[in-house]
């Protein structure tokens, strides 16, 4: 088994936190993990991506070739579109439905939605609304991770444990908010 995932978004949206949770989850499940990150100009709303490769056998490269990603997990729809060339023919995109408009020529939402829905299996989720129901919009990335976890083939309990481990230093309330966000994202049906 080898799975390739691209996590994409804009600086400050928690892309690397999502990657860390998946990394810990996979390693705690006895799997091999390789990760590569590209940090954009995060302070200026630049693109951030993480390539994650997970396998039950040793992995030699951390970069996902074009056309080989099983899933694109995006915190923003334009960033989801940016990485479509990496997606396998029958791959899945899971993306937030709400755009983060950070440039003057950002495409119209209807154009983005139509493009995403026309090309591939795409799940869009109002992650912000779900995150707010858990106590903070800052957990919207974890809502998306929860929805994506249904396609990643790792037991839910491993994700919960990884969230507890990675957020423990921030206190019980933050841990519980993130577990709530993950669980509600996992329950989401498009």
Image: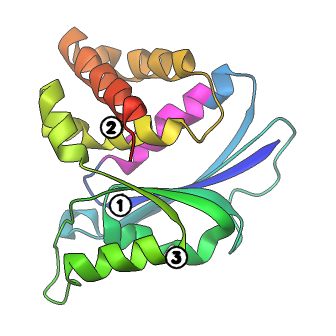
Can residue 97 be found in the magenta stretch?
Answer: no
Disc 1: which residue: 9
CA–CA distance in space, label 2 to label 1: 14 Å
Q: Which residue is mark 3?
A: 119
**Name of the residue lying farthest toward the bottom:** 105
With 112 as the anchor, is 166 left or right in this view?
right
Q: Is residue 63 left or right of residue 116?
A: right
**Disc 2 to disc 1: CB gap under 8 Å:** no
Could one spot residue 40 in this view of the protein?
no
For this orientation, the residue located farthest to the top is: 172
Residue drawn at x 54%, y 69% is: 120
How far apart marks 3 and 1 lie (CA) works out to: 19 Å
Q: Which residue is mark 2?
A: 143
For the point 40% across and 80% down, the residue is 115
**In the structure shown, which secondary structural element does the residue marked by tag 2 occupy?**
helix
Figure check: 64 above or below 67: above
């Amino acid at each position: 088994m080898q799975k390739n995932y691209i996590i994409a978004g804009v600086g400050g949206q928690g892309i690397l936190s999502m990657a860390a949770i998946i990394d810990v989850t996979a390693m705690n499940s006895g799997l091999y993990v390789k990760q590569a990150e590209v940090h954009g100009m995060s302070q200026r709303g630049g693109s951030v991506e993480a390539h994650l490769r997970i396998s039950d056998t040793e992995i030699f490269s951390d970069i996902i070739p074009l056309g080989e990603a099983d899933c694109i997990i995006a915190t923003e729809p334009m960033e989801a579109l940016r990485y479509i060339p990496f997606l396998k023919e029958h791959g899945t995109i899971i993306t937030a439905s709400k755009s983060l408009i950070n440039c003057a020529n950002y495409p119209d939402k209807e154009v983005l939605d139509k493009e995403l829905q026309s090309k591939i299996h795409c799940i869009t989720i109002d992650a912000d609304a779900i995150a707010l129901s858990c106590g903070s919009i800052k957990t919207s990335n974890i809502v998306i991770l929860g929805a994506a976890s249904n396609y990643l083939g790792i037991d839910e309990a491993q994700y919960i444990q990884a969230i507890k481990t990675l957020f423990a230093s921030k206190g019980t309330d933050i841990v519980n908010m993130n577990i709530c966000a993950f669980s509600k994202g996992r329950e989401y049906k498009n």
